[in-house]
């Protein structure tokens, strides 16, 4: 009886905590935040913040969106009770300060004295970097429990904190579940065999200008549309044997469009963080190393281009929540000696999750202190940078960019404009014809004036990049960028834009949406025709195939209305039910549909819905995730297959189940043996997995692939996986870049010029002269085939002026080499992509290579 009463009373006692004070994280969780081998998962994180919302007048918990797996993305708004009661008022002040065109200087001066600094802190974007998600609980508690004499209260009087405890809720839950499952086993704190973002994995921090992911869109809506913070800190983790914490200032180089005042503000915040960390006795704090001022499309650095003080912290990692011991001799030599940027090295020893939490608490509180101390200055600077963006035109800056109506792929042009809008770019439409730089443009033309609050971001998207070579001598190895060297959006998406140098007059209005930039066509012929140059046509074609509607492709040009469509056009014989499906698809996708009275039967290739498989290894490759994303984005059905599907123990062989197998970009050793090359820089990060996730497809799997292709299947190899074919199939192909040192050839994620054969099936719909991203790519050399092989070169790198945006050393190694190959092996095909045609779901301009490979069919007898 006594035991039963005690059990009944304990929940009652816990429910009374608000009567005596605010519940601490330790009371709620049953352990101290950051304790060894203890984690609060995402459900617990949200539940605790909901409890603080109920118990404190200083915190409001909001849902700002839903994750990829439909979890709530939450944001805690923390400030004084008075500030929270007037949030809409303070948000309206920021909207006025951001746009000096509608706010006179005299009014702006008054607003900067009255307004509050909004600070956004985003945590746990990379889900294995779990410390900041845990820290967010204790940070929130400290802020809402200070008394009226506490410095915390002053911070909350001056600052509105927007705290997102996890930028990737799905991954946070995945990592916690996996960690707890294998606690106390040899796999404790180890990697998962799948991506911790369902599509992007670690690449969720490269999506901040494409907005593919719902998490990116939700947080960017906070940053650039709804809340407009002046300061943004993104908290991360890094390797374990170097510094304990990186904080700004950053190292060279810098993106030229970023304003000097922004960099000074970054330095102010970072220096104050370093001072406070040092004062509290935290060693191993570094700045101006590893992390550059060059934009890579990441969460924190995209803020720079929006005149927001974007900050990054990177703490030394543990094994998720398990402590590690770093012997003094294991500390990286470059982090063992005192330097100006690293005055107090960490000597080595035990390193725990709680250590990370303490560092992050200190730097987060330091940031609030700086925001409070310089409240008015940050608001003044926010207005001043927007004013500079609008009123000051630097030498060689364009006056505007125009997106013409007459696009080869107007559907993708519309998507590009929508992507830019999500990032806060102002887009106008012409209400009447106008002339700019001597060229006439029709009504409806999209005009992007560079004079706008987010000019740095606008220019960074539309201009071509030239990554600075930081070497002192050419014979030295190149100093690589942190990630990409070039990203120019119109080049990646295959959208024509025109740079306008001189001011012009036009009747413009803000575009309410990225509506189609092309007229609809009336259809009267016996055949409906979809233009192969439009990515939207492929989406509609797959939709029709799923509806069992008969659809063909033409291997020759087709005359429609007032133009000639190139080879590869989709042909649908007219019928009532077909017309209904076509109109429905066209209405959904804004796709132009043409018509023709007659078509040459001998030129038509009947399509069927391909049975597509995507190979997913246990290495959690990001390229595999992005490949799935692209197919899902275009509603193309597929099946995920693993190692067992290639083995004899599989119930059904590949040939009976699939028409197409895609090998995403991955090291051939990883595909075959389940582990990287021993000499690979990634081998040190390769930790063991539970037995069911060990190994690759093996020799048996390679033989299965050979059989699959030999009996008529299509194998698509993306970038690095093409080396598996070169190594195991012995085709008449080699990689011209194999084993070249970086001093001879170096091209880090840049955009290059390619020449395409648009009459080849893989090249259908592509322009003859195109741009392609080059990232860890291949340059194929071919030879005259013999035996069971044949080959067609579909795309080659240009013979000169190859680099379009970014950085390239050794262009001679690309010249006259193939970027895309179509190989015939026995009865089947191998489509080898030396360029990342679907990279990060950003390279819309080269998607057609992949889509065409999925739809590959043998030509009619008459065409052979």
Image (cartoon, rainbow, N blue to C red):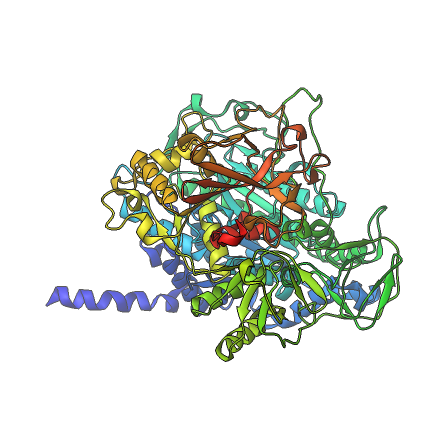
Is there any visible trace of residue 228 in the rendered image?
no
* Residue ranking furthest to the front: 862
Q: Check the image and report above or below for 53 versus 555.
A: below
* Residue ranking furthest to the bottom: 576
Where's the N terminus, which quadrant?
Answer: bottom left
At 66% across and 62% down in the image, what residue appears?
A: 410
Q: Nearer the viewer, residue 159 or 514?
A: 514
At 28% across and 66% down in the image, what residue appears?
A: 13
Q: Is residue 487 left or right of residue 130?
A: right
Q: Nearer the viewer, residue 448 or 166?
A: 448
Q: Position of residue 99 (x, y in %)?
A: 76, 64
Q: Check the image and report above or below for 412 versus 624.
A: below
Which of the 4 quarters of the picture holds residue 219?
Answer: bottom right
Q: Position of residue 407 (x, y in %)?
A: 70, 60
Q: Position of residue 328 (x, y in %)?
A: 43, 23
Q: Is residue 172 left or right of residue 503?
A: left
Is there any visible trace of residue 476 in the rendered image?
yes
Q: Number of callouts in the render?
A: 0
At 76% across and 70% down in the image, what residue appears?
A: 444
Q: Nearer the viewer, residue 765 or 34?
A: 765
Q: Position of residue 213 (x, y in %)?
A: 52, 58
Which of the 4 quarters of the picture holds residue 710?
Answer: top left
Q: Check the image and report above or below for 218 versus 689.
A: below
């Amino acid at each position: 009886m006594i035991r039963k009463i005690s059990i009944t009373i304990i929940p009652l006692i816990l429910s009374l905590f608000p009567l005596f004070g605010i519940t601490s994280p330790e009371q709620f969780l049953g352990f101290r935040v950051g304790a060894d081998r203890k984690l609060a998962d995402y459900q617990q994180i949200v539940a605790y913040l909901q409890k603080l919302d109920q118990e404190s007048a200083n915190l409001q918990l909001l849902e700002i969106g839903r994750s990829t797996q439909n979890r709530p993305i939450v944001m805690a708004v923390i400030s004084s009770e008075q500030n929270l009661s007037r949030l809409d008022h303070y948000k309206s002040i920021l909207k006025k300060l951001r746009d000096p065109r509608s706010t006179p200087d005299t009014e702006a001066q008054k607003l900067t004295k009255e307004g509050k600094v909004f600070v956004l802190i985003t945590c746990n974007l990379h889900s294995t970097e779990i410390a900041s998600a845990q820290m967010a609980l204790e940070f929130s508690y400290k802020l809402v429990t200070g008394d009226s004499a506490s410095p915390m209260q002053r911070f909350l009087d001056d600052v509105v904190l927007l705290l997102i405890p996890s930028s990737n809720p799905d991954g946070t839950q995945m990592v916690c579940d996996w960690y707890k499952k294998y606690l106390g086993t040899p796999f404790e704190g180890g990697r998962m065999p799948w991506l911790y973002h369902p599509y992007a994995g670690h690449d969720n921090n490269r999506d901040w200008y494409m907005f593919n992911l719902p998490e990116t869109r939700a947080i960017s809506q906070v940053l650039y549309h709804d809340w407009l913070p002046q300061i943004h800190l993104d908290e991360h983790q890094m390797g374990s044997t170097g510094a304990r914490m990186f904080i700004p200032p950053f190292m060279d180089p810098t993106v030229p469009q970023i304003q000097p005042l922004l960099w000074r503000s970054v330095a102010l915040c970072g220096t104050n963080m370093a001072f406070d960390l040092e004062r509290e006795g935290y060693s191993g704090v570094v700045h101006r190393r590893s992390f550059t001022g060059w934009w890579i499309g990441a969460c924190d650095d995209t803020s720079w281009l929006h005149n927001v003080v974007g900050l990054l912290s990177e703490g030394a990692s543990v094994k998720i929540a398990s402590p590690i011991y770093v012997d003094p001799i294991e500390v990286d030599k470059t982090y063992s000696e005192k330097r100006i940027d690293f005055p107090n090295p960490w000597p080595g020893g035990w390193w725990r999750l709680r250590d990370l939490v303490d560092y992050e608490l200190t730097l987060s509180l330091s940031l609030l202190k700086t925001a409070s101390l310089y409240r008015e200055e940050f608001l003044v600077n926010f207005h001043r940078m927007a004013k500079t963006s609008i009123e000051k035109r630097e030498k060689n800056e364009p006056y505007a960019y125009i997106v013409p109506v007459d696009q080869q792929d107007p559907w993708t042009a519309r998507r590009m404009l929508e992507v830019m809008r999500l990032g806060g770019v102002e887009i106008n439409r012409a209400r009447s014809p106008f002339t700019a730089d001597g060229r006439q443009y029709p009504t409806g033309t999209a005009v992007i004036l560079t004079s706008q609050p987010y000019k740095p971001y606008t220019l960074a998207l539309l201009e071509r990049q030239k990554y600075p070579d930081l070497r002192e001598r050419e014979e030295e190895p190149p100093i690589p960028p942190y990630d990409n060297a070039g990203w120019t959006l119109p080049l990646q998406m295959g959208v024509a834009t025109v740079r306008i140098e001189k001011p012009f007059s036009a009747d413009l209005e803000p575009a309410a949406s990225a509506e189609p930039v092309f007229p609809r066509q009336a259809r009267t012929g016996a055949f409906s025709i979809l233009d192969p140059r439009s990515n939207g046509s492929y989406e509609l074609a797959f939709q029709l195939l799923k509806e069992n509607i008969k659809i063909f492709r033409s291997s020759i040009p087709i005359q429609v209305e007032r133009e000639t469509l190139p080879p590869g056009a989709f042909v649908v014989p007219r019928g009532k039910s077909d017309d209904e499906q076509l109109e429905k698809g066209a209405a959904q996708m804004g796709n132009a549909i043409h018509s023709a009275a007659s078509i040459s039967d001998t030129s038509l290739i009947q399509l069927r819905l391909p049975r597509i498989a995507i190979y997913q290894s246990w290495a959690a490759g990001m390229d595999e995730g992005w490949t799935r994303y692209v197919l899902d984005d275009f509603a193309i059905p597929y099946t995920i297959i693993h190692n067992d599907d290639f083995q004899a123990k599989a119930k059904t062989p590949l040939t009976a189940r699939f028409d197409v197998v895609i090998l995403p970009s991955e090291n051939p050793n990883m595909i075959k043996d389940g582990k990287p090359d021993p000499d690979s820089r990634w081998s040190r990060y390769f930790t063991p997995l539970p037995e069911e996730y060990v190994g690759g497809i093996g020799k048996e799997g390679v033989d299965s692939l050979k059989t699959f292709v030999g009996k008529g299947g299509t194998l698509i190899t993306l970038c690095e996986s093409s080396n598996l074919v070169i190594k195991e199939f012995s085709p008449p192909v080699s990689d011209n870049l194999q084993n070249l040192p970086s001093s001879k050839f170096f091209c880090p994620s840049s955009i290059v010029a390619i020449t395409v054969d648009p009459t080849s099936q893989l090249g259908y719909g592509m322009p003859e002269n195109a741009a392609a991203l080059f990232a860890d790519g291949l340059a194929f050399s071919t030879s005259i085939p013999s035996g069971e092989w044949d080959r067609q070169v579909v795309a080659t790198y240009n013979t000169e002026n190859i680099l379009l945006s970014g950085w390239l050393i050794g262009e001679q190694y690309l010249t006259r080499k193939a970027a895309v190959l179509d190989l015939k092996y026995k009865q089947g095909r191998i489509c080898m992509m030396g360029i990342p045609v679907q990279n990060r779901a950003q390279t819309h301009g080269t998607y057609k290579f992949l889509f065409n490979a999925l739809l590959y069919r043998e030509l009619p007898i008459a065409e052979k």
